[in-house]
Image (cartoon, rainbow, N blue to C red):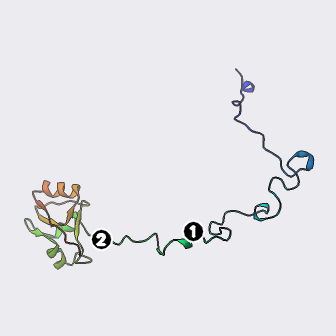
Amino acid sequence: MKLHDLTPNEGAKKKRIRVGRGISAGRGKTAGRGTKGEGSRSGTGGNVYRQGGNLPFYRRLPFMRGEGFTPPNQVEYNEINLAQLDRFSANSEVSPEVLNDEKMLGKKNNPVVVLGRGEVNVPLKVKAHRVTKSAQSKIEAAGGSVEIIPFASE
């Protein structure tokens, strides 16, 4: 086999149709676009909002402004990383009330989640509404304990 013997598979290549090249070509005059109307003109198609007189789809939907919309029952947490807990001394209790007194919470009424970024070197008694697995394993490895407290949503 030589390079000049190579050919593409049968039906892999298809000859393009040259349109608009006279009446004997079979695709002359209107070149398969029909007569008049939007589809016969160049530069048409691509405006998603125009639906030929129908009420556009985006106007049929109820108003939900912004990037999609914010789910109404979404829980927003105060995020605390382990690196932020290094200010507490050994065997101290870390609860949402203590964190609020230390001015570490953005919104005091929101639940607290402890995330695993950083390290804990002293044993702490952590009470939070949610704790990630990595944070829990690091706290317990340092000799501390984790207690999950229930969150009463309004």
Kindly report which numbered mark, 1 or 2, lies closer to the viewer in this rendering. 1
Q: Report the residue that reaches farthest toward the left.
A: 91
Q: Report the residue that reaches farthest toward the top.
A: 1
The residue lying at 86 percent from left, 52 percent from top is 20
Q: Residues within 10 Å of mark 1 (few under 14, many from 20)?
A: few
The residue lying at 32 percent from left, 70 percent from top is 73
Compute the Cα span from label 1 to label 2. 32 Å
Q: Can you identify the residue that label 1 sits on?
A: 57
**Image quarter of the N terminus:** top right
- Secondary structure of residue under mark 1: helix
Figure check: 12 above or below 1: below
Where residue 105 appears, x then y in whole percent? 23, 75
Where residue 33 appears, x then y in whole percent? 80, 56
**Image quarter of the C terminus:** bottom left
Q: Report the residue that reaches farthest toward the front.
A: 54
Q: Residues within 10 Å of mark 2 (few under 14, many from 20)?
A: few
- Amino acid residing under circle 1: Phe
Task: Decide which of 92, 133 is in the foreground and name it.
Answer: 133
Q: Can you identify the residue that label 2 sits on?
A: 76
Task: Decide which of 106, 147 is in the foreground and name it.
Answer: 147
- First in sequence: mark 1 vs mark 2: 1
Figure check: 154 above or below 128: below
Q: Quadrant of residue 129?
A: bottom left
Figure check: 109 above or below 51: below
Q: Which mark is residue 28?
A: none
Task: Decide which of 123, 137 is in the foreground and name it.
Answer: 137
- Secondary structure of residue under mark 2: loop
